[in-house]
Image (spheres, rainbow, N blue to C red):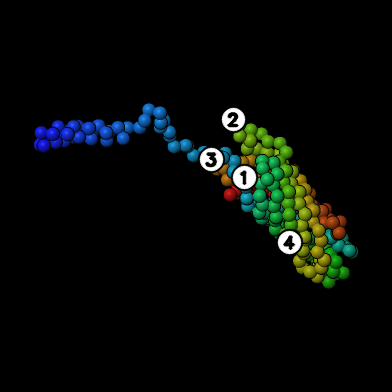
Amino acid sequence: MQKVLAPLALSAALLLPAMAGAQDTPSAGSAMQDRPAVTFNEVERGVYFGVYGGPSWITNPPADSGPRPFSSGQMAQVELGVDLGERLSLGVFFMGSANRAGAEYVGYSQGAASGDFTMLVPGAVLRARLVGFADSQEVKRTWIYARAGVGYAMFSPKKLLPDSDILVFAGPGVEYYTRLRHFSVGLEVVGNYLASKGAFGFAVAPNIRYAF
């Protein structure tokens, strides 16, 4: 019996390491694959947050009597929206402006109030990117765009301008998508119009946007 078991034990001792090595070695038909590389978009688009600010002017401030002097001021605006592909964006905004008008401006107060006024405007806006220019890496970073919006304008002081109005605006701009991917910077010139009061204005607005 021992003579029979001894050769079997020796054979098993020799075969086990070979079998273990065969299990650890990948089959010839299987290919080793590298982990796929992580890639990033050169320009991020999607939900965005934008900030605008700069000088603004109203050529003929609203009034029912008295002079309507050319008025200069400052405007600031925040915007939240979404990019609909490469060329279109939709958003909502909140804008505030302060304008100097002088003591001779009485608005709709019949002389009970005069001077400077402010305007607060919530509304909606559409941006259309018209022409894009590629850089040396064939990435369209610079765009010429048109932007238009409409909002509900509320004035202060109420004694000077008691009634609200509809503000519409539109104008061209240029936008550059930086190499930080999420950020773009721009500059636009827009014309403004207060619909019921017949007042025209315009603004120059540097801006910055962050896309999430």
Give, as a three-letter code, the residue at label 1.
Arg
Residue 193: image location, x then y, percent: 82, 53
Q: Quadrant of the N terminus?
A: top left
Secondary element at image label 1: loop
Q: Which residue is mark 3?
A: 40
Marks 1 and 4: in contact by CB < 8 Å?
no
Whichever of callouts 3 and 4 sits on the residue coming sooner in the sequence is: 3
Select label 1 or label 2 by which is in front: 1
Q: Residues within 10 Å of mark 3 (few under 14, many from 20)?
A: few
Residue 35: image location, x then y, percent: 44, 37
| Image mark for residue 136 | 2
Give, as a three-letter code, the residue at label 4.
Leu
Distance from label 3 to label 2 (Cα)? 18 Å
| Image mark for residue 31 | none
Secondary element at image label 2: loop
Distance from label 3 to label 4 (Cα)? 39 Å
**Residue depicted at 59% across the width and 30% down the height:** 136
Whichever of callouts 3 and 2 sits on the residue coming sooner in the sequence is: 3
**Residue depicted at 73% across the width and 54% down the height:** 124
Q: Is residue 83 left or right of residue 194?
A: left
Residue 165 falls in which quadrant of the image?
A: bottom right
Q: Which residue is mark 4?
A: 120
Distance from label 4 to label 1 (Cα)? 29 Å
Name, please, the residue furthest toward the top: 28
